[in-house]
Structures are given as C-alpha cells and as structure tokens.
Image (cartoon, rainbow, N blue to C red):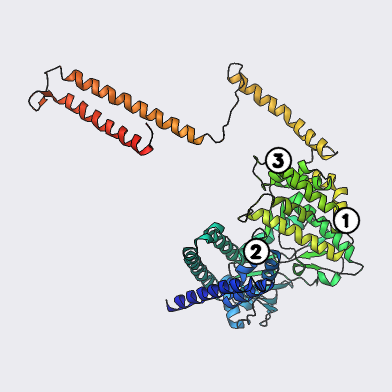
Amino acid sequence: MAGTVRRGGQIAWAGLKLGVAVLRLRRRALDLLPAYVSTTLVGLGTTFVKLGQGLSLRWDLLPAPYREALSRLHSDVPAFPADQARRIVEQAFGAPVDELFASFDDKPLAAASVAQIHAARMHDGRDVVVKITRPGIHAQVQADLRLLRRTVRVAQWLWPPLKRHRPLELVDELGAFLRDEIDMRHEAQNMRRMAKVLDPLPAITQPHVVEPYATRDVLVQDRSHGTRLEAAYGTAAAPALASGLLDAYVHQLFGAGVFHADPHPGNLFFFDDGRLCLHDFGSIGVLDPASRLALGGMVEAIAADDAEAVLDTAIALGFFPPQVERRAHVREIHLILAEMASRPLAQWSIAEAIWRVARIGQGAGFRLPAHLLALIRTLFLVENTLRALDPDLDLLGTLSARAADIMAIVDTSRPAGRPLAMRLARTARQLPQIATDLLRQAQLSDGRPAFSVHHHGLTSTQEALARTGNRLALALVTLGLYVSGALLTLHTDGPQVLGHLPFLAVVAFAAAGFLSLRLVIAITRSGHL
C-alpha cells in the first residue's frame, strides 16, 4: 500500500512539474518542450516510456516535434541476472533450459525496458533468439495504468476543459497498446499472420516463430544475421532494395490487406543476396477489401489530379461521413493537389496528400480510428525509407505507371481506363443487381416499387407527435371512465359505498381522477398545453 501511494505521488508530482514547464516554456522556449516531455517520461520508468512510444503513433494529436521526440524514447535499463532469465524460460515451457536448447548464452544480446534477448541454438542446429520479458513487468504496468487513470481524473476535476480532449479514452487506448507490447503471444500471432503474407515473396522475408515456444513471457524466434538497412544508403544496391520494398508494400496493402505497421529503418535488414528482412512485429495493420479498394482508388485519383474521386475514396475509407459538404471539401482537395503538383517530382508525397485530405474540416479534437492511423503512419515511414534508399525516386510517377496493376490486385474485374471511366464502369456493373432488387420489391408490393424515405433533423418532431398521441389516448380512456362511473351511479344493484354510491362507480371515478392527475402533471412539465 505504501509503495502504491509513493508511486502515485511520483506520477502526480511529475505531471505537476510538466504542467508548470509547459506554462513556463511555451512563451520563451517552445522548442524545448518535446525534449522536456521525453525526459519526464523516462524518469517515470518503463510503463511511461512505452506509453510515450505509443503516443508517438498518434499523428492526429501531436505535432511532428513531439512525435519525433517520443518515437526515440528509450530507457537505460540494466540487464537482469541470467539465473532469473533461465527461471522465467523454465517456468514458461516447463523444462530445464539445457533440455530446451543445445546452447544458451547467459549474456544477453540486448536489454530493453520490456524484455531482453539471449542467443541460443536448438538441438536441430538452428540459431535462435530468446526474447524474455522483465520480471514483474505485467504487475508493474497494471498498477501504473490504474494510478495514471486516477491522476487523469484528478486533473480533469482541477481543470475541466481537459475533458474535451477525452484523456481517459486515450489512456485506455495506450494501455491496450502497452499490454500488447509486453505480451509475447501477441507478437507471435502477428509473426504467424505476416508469414503467410511475406513468405510467397522472393525479395523479402522475416524471422519465424520457433513453434511451440511462444508464451506470455517468452518468445523463441529465428535469428537473423542480416545487415541494418541504413548501411545500404548511398550504395549501388540501394535502388534495387527500394524497388523490393515498394513491391512488398504494394502486395501487403493492396493484395493481402495485412501489413507490417512499423517499417522504420531500425526494423529493416538486408542480406547479401539482396533480400530484405522485416523485424519487430509488435504492430501490424489490417485493411478489409473495401478499404483496400478505396485506398487504391485514392492513390489513382491523386495521381490523376481528380479531386472528386479523392473525396469519394476518402469517404469510403472513413475519413469523412457520407453527408459531407462536397463543394467545400472538393475545393480544399484541389488546393492540396495543386500545392503538391508545384513540387519537384522527387518530393511528391502520397502519404502527406492523404494525411492532409483526412484533416480537412477537422477541429482540435480530431481523432482518427486506430487502423487508419496505422495506415497513414506506415505510408509515411515507407516513403521516408524509399527516399533514403533512392533520393531521386519519382514515387508518384512509379505509382501512376502501376495504377492499373494496383487496382487489378484489389478489383480483378475492373476494366482499364481513366478514373471517371472506371467509376462509371463499376457503377454499370451494379445496375443489374439494382434493377433486380427494384423489380423484386415491386413484385411484393402489387406492382408498386417500395421506396424508403429517410428524414434528417425531424427527431424532435417525431417525439412530440408520439407524446401527443399518448396523451390523446390517455384522455379518451379517462373520459370513458368518467362516463362509465356516471352510468354506474344510476344503478343500485351490488355493493355500495358511503351509503348510496355503487362501489364500481367509485372505482371508475378514482381511476379517472388518477389518470386526469397524470395528464395535468405531464402537460405542466412540458410547458405546453
């Protein structure tokens, strides 16, 4: 209990100092704030370092300097002892380390805030790495997340305008990201899924899970002996590697709909034979067939300078609601495409164009769904890596030349042609089904087509009509009870009350009086007769 209180005080004190620093630096040295935020998170330890890395993915919330500072976050954590590492492995797999591996290096290859990596060799001769989470990391993360939520609630109480930014939702989202990061089963699942996508490609590969050695705390995978991709920058092999990377992501994004969502240079390696190798599968993205088709159409429309088509595909991707102000949005898209067209071809950015389109008309509380954020961030990272490998790459021209092939991947039945002709052709293919549905509806309605009419903005009117109908029905019932009571007073048969009033007449008048009171109260509360 004392430890929890102490940790809570540490988090609250760090938050208070950060708030004071923001007020102090924003007027004099605004450019120092990102570094100060990073230093604060590092001081709070593993949980907050990983939360900061997760926050760096929120392109819709943070300016670029903050994203860059948080994406570089790391904490200098010493390796934990080899005997603890061995004990965690043995608890995970239920067997001694010497039985599981032909050799196990007690000295870790690397130690990070969440896990450390040991080299090992399987009994069949395969070189592997064993990724082991730090002892107590799961309990620490859960406790820190609970304390963080409490701290945020107090901050909202002290400063109510903070609620507009929905900080508790953000904490929950980052917490889910962190729980996945520290669960080796999640990474193993991603690796298996990506293996089905990448294994058929000759120019790219990835490490594989060594089955069945994947638990919450330990993951065993193939060891890759490739070279970091940065070593290829400026070499004769770089353009070929860029072409291979572009092919791999065209296949992932448009063909498979599953993609590696963190392709920064530190996660990319290459072999002497020219193959690329992807690492670190803590984050992958998924696109359903409709989103793949819309994304392909957007790339095609941007290349064709077709603002109307860009808007259509942006709506299909979920950037805007269907009832959008088309004229204003098309005008904004025209401006974006015109500004892009004024740049040299090598500086054209599909990712930037999509991101700027997504932000049209959005306010300060703009927040994209996680899967669209993963997509946009991946596009930026891939573009940056492609340009680092081949600075003269005309990405727009390359994609324009391959537009028909890209769209054929996601829509094999679409004909070739310009975007307008393609949209008309796609609509024409839907006409027979539309006609069939209309004829079927007419057949079921005595030859009259059944059309549905939807009104927007009439909810309050509908509710008022419903209340009026209920009151009229209640008034008629009340009137009937009064009439029934009056008629019953004319008969002297049956039990009587107060000497001469029939009992049933009294019951009718009492019920009528109760319902009359209900009507009067309802009308009084509404303020209208």
> Is there a contact, CB below 8 Å, between mark 2 and mark 1?
no
Depth check: 132 or 40 in front? Answer: 40
Say what amino acid the circle numbered 3 marks: Arg
The numbered mark, 2 or 1, whose residue comes first in the sequence reads 2
**Is residue 133 visible to the viewer in this orientation of the structure?**
no
> Which mark identifies residue 345?
1
Going 60% across and 23% down the picture, which residue do you hit?
450
Residue positioned 83% across, 62% down in the render: 386
Mark 2 crowdedness (10 Å alpha carbons): few <14, some 14-19, many ≥20: many
x and y, in percent, of residue 318 in the image: 66, 47
The C terminus lies in quadrant: top left
Distance CA(mark 3)–CA(mark 1): 29 Å
Per the image, the residue denoted by label 2 is 187
Q: Which residue is mark 3?
A: 326
Of tags 2 and 1, which is closer to the observer? Answer: 1
Q: Residue at x 36, y 26 (%)?
A: 472
Label drawn at residue 118: none
Residue sitting nearer the eye, 196 or 427: 427
